[in-house]
Amino acid sequence: MTINQYYGKNAVYAQAGGATAMLNTSAAGVIQAWQQHAPSDAVLYAAHEGILGVLAERLFDVTHLAEHKLQGLAQSPSAAFGTCRHVLQPNEAQRLVDVLRAHDIGYFFYNGGGGAARACQDVLAVAVQFSYPLNAIHIPKTIDNDLPATDCSIGFGSAAKYLATSLREASLDLASVASSSSKVFILETMGRYSGWLTLACGLAFQHDTKQAYLLLLPELPFDEQRFLDRVEQTIETYGYCVVAVAEGVVDSQGKTLHASGLQDAAGDRQLGGIAPMLAALISSKLGHKCHWSVADYLQRSARHLASLVDSEQALATGKAAVTLALQGRINFSPIIQRLADNPYQWQIQPVPLVEVAAPERRVPLEFLTVDGWQLSEAGRAYLLPLIQGQAPVVFEEGLPLYPQLNLPFVVKKLAEFEVVI
Amino acid sequence: MTINQYYGKNAVYAQAGGATAMLNTSAAGVIQAWQQHAPSDAVLYAAHEGILGVLAERLFDVTHLAEHKLQGLAQSPSAAFGTCRHVLQPNEAQRLVDVLRAHDIGYFFYNGGGGAARACQDVLAVAVQFSYPLNAIHIPKTIDNDLPATDCSIGFGSAAKYLATSLREASLDLASVASSSSKVFILETMGRYSGWLTLACGLAFQHDTKQAYLLLLPELPFDEQRFLDRVEQTIETYGYCVVAVAEGVVDSQGKTLHASGLQDAAGDRQLGGIAPMLAALISSKLGHKCHWSVADYLQRSARHLASLVDSEQALATGKAAVTLALQGRINFSPIIQRLADNPYQWQIQPVPLVEVAAPERRVPLEFLTVDGWQLSEAGRAYLLPLIQGQAPVVFEEGLPLYPQLNLPFVVKKLAEFEVVI
């Protein structure tokens, strides 16, 4: 008697949270492994827009997705099936079980970050409550790299590679104009609670180039005067100063800078990003002309400059989620375990859901130099393996080709159900 | 008696205006052609920071730059020798001629946009005033693509490719979250007086993908209500709306939106970019959550995603500037002439300086759809050839390698001269 006898034979895969350059690569891994290892009559559904699609019974049948479509999927950024951040509500519990039962679903694969890990636990709790046998598997993904338990999160390496490249390029630009024009360039990265993406910006600066930069992470409170002093000192030393700042930087009271009352040159409250706010501060207090950029979606969708290591881990975690589940492993997340930095070695290790649903993992301070402003050697050793290699991209008419699936929904078996978003 | 007998045997090359992904490629073309065609005792100098370096006698000797260094230079973004936007002042005229004479300079190559073309004319006027024989050559470059006379400007194709790719990626991201979260993404591009870069964002959308976008160019005055209506209508049709906006968009009175008094949701004046301003407008008037990005330097430095056609034209114009000048052509700019759209054919045509120093070339309205919101087929036919192919990049440790020259200045022959910036 195997575990499979207790579980529905079909599976549903869903995507959660912010899209990344590698989320669809994990999806391709899930589908490939299902095609290879699942019983021939077992169906793999993909839900439209995460758990919302499960509740609304908006499902695609991806069991027999053709090889060339899988290839296109694996090379496309974003979330091909749509995503959401929905938290399961008590009035949705019965409906959830109804949908799972109607489609004989025994496996729920949720591909996302900490929110998806907690959603997996919620779905599992509902299943238990209704005595519905369900195997809930979380597949780790987030550019924020803040998932606990895993050495890194799928999608982070690609976003890190993109940001470090972009800042290297922009820094050369700034250096070329600094003596007679702008002396400061500020790049705002994502990262509300942790500064991993901002840390990765430090990779832009090699040992043999000018270290004319500073990093502002949410892990270290922002001190206006100390910041201005450091900017001025960097300009005096190198002629210019590059700043990478996380959107979630906080002041000494723990309030984000947006809420802290920091004002621009005209005394107005700033509603844009942190980057224009800091530009206005430097401009008014130090008198330097600044340029700034807010990367926003660009950093999490930049499949054109993605890490090969990241894509390999994306595919491998997707595949491992299916093969381990089909082998009987339940309620787990296939995380990345680092075995060595250089040469980089890693393996996949299944861990209980509770471990990835724990609070965010922040940047350890030893990954910063002792003064807190720059990337340390320990930080560099951690980051470098994750950005190695170029994930392949197909170009057509001069632009990356990201084919869309355009699948039809499967025929619904249940009545309509309105989800309140 | 050849023209060369009247001119100093040496040359100076300088870079002006904003850096681009291809400015150094033109520099490599200039140096290569000089190495091949100039007399063996003729020196090619590169000035530090454009005309400022000529005035300050901060010169590098690049005559014998090694082949592998030229290769690295050609593949690096920004302006390797530094740049400026300095306008020659009357009190600098004598000094300019002193420096040219001290180094026996008969050729002045200025690589830049409209400002550099006008600077070329200024330098020439000073030379004439002092009866100093000088051949002033402008090498066309600007991501803004607003140079008259030429079919396109070097650097534009790469910036266009980068922006179209980035917006394609970000649009997929938006589409994946739109039904339960953000419904609008705004990308702000450069372009103070012309909307070429914004126009290129239309390439992100293929014929078979949702045309869920609109473009805001400086060529068409911004009408708040018409804009809001179109955004709402796009969301109703497709579920989301992507906006590409030029930094120089103006209202019906011709004032840039920054100065037009457009206010954010809280009634505050916005000092950030146009993108956050539009995001606040949509959020307050339509109630939709927005994401926005300001590309800034990233779009003009993105050598990692540069156009092969652009790099070929960059090299070719640099080489043509030198070969034509050495053949006796004077006071010209080697511009790009388009012979055919598809398959794309082009050639270099030298034109008098006055033609490239004319007012900016704006986007013709036939490059937009009749309603003014999107890229027309004529616009697509113009743009597509310019973004074809991937200019090669060398990666090291996971990131593009952009080697720096670190050349020493040549020994000065004149007394110090202070340039007031």
Image (cartoon, coloured by chain):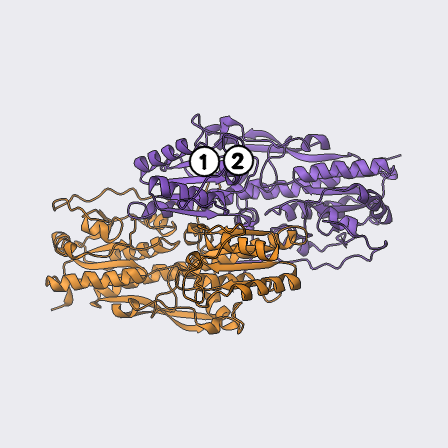
Chain colours: A purple, B orange
- Tell which subunit mark 1 falls on: A
Pointer 1 with pointer 2, Cβ within 8 A: yes
Give the percent coordinates (x, y) of residue B244. Answer: 51, 59
User: What residue is at 74 percent from the left and 38 percent from the top?
Assistant: A120
Q: Is residue A227 left or right of residue B114?
A: right
Quarter of the N terminus of chain B within the rendering: bottom left
Please tell me whether residue B249 is drawn above or below residue B173 in the rendered image.
Answer: below
10 Å neighbourhood of mark 1: few (<14), some, or many (≥20)? many
Q: Which residue is mark 1?
A: A215
- Tell which subunit mark 2 falls on: A
Amino acid at the residue labelled 2:
Gly
Q: Nearer the viewer, residue A271 or A103?
A: A271
Please tell me whether residue A272 is drawn above or below residue A357 in the rendered image.
Answer: below
Residue A233's image quarter? Answer: top left
Q: Which mark is residue B101?
A: none
Q: Nearer the viewer, residue B346 or B52?
A: B52
Residue B5's image quarter? Answer: bottom left
- Judged from the image, the secondary structure of the residue bearing numbered disc 1 is strand
One can see residue A181 in this view: yes
10 Å neighbourhood of mark 2: few (<14), some, or many (≥20)? many
Amino acid at the residue labelled 1:
Leu
Mark 1 or 2, nearer chain start:
2
Marks 1/2: CA–CA distance = 9 Å
User: What residue is at 39 percent from the left and 34 percent from the top?
Assistant: A207
One can see residue A394 in this view: no
Give the percent coordinates (x, y) of residue A240. Answer: 34, 41
Please tell me whether residue A329 is drawn above or below residue B174 in the rendered image.
Answer: above
User: What residue is at 15 percent from the left and 67 percent from the top?
Assistant: B3
Judge if badges 1 and 2 mark residues of a common chain.
yes
Q: Which residue is mark 2?
A: A195
Give the percent coordinates (x, y) of residue B371. Answer: 54, 72
- Judged from the image, the secondary structure of the residue bearing numbered disc 2 is loop
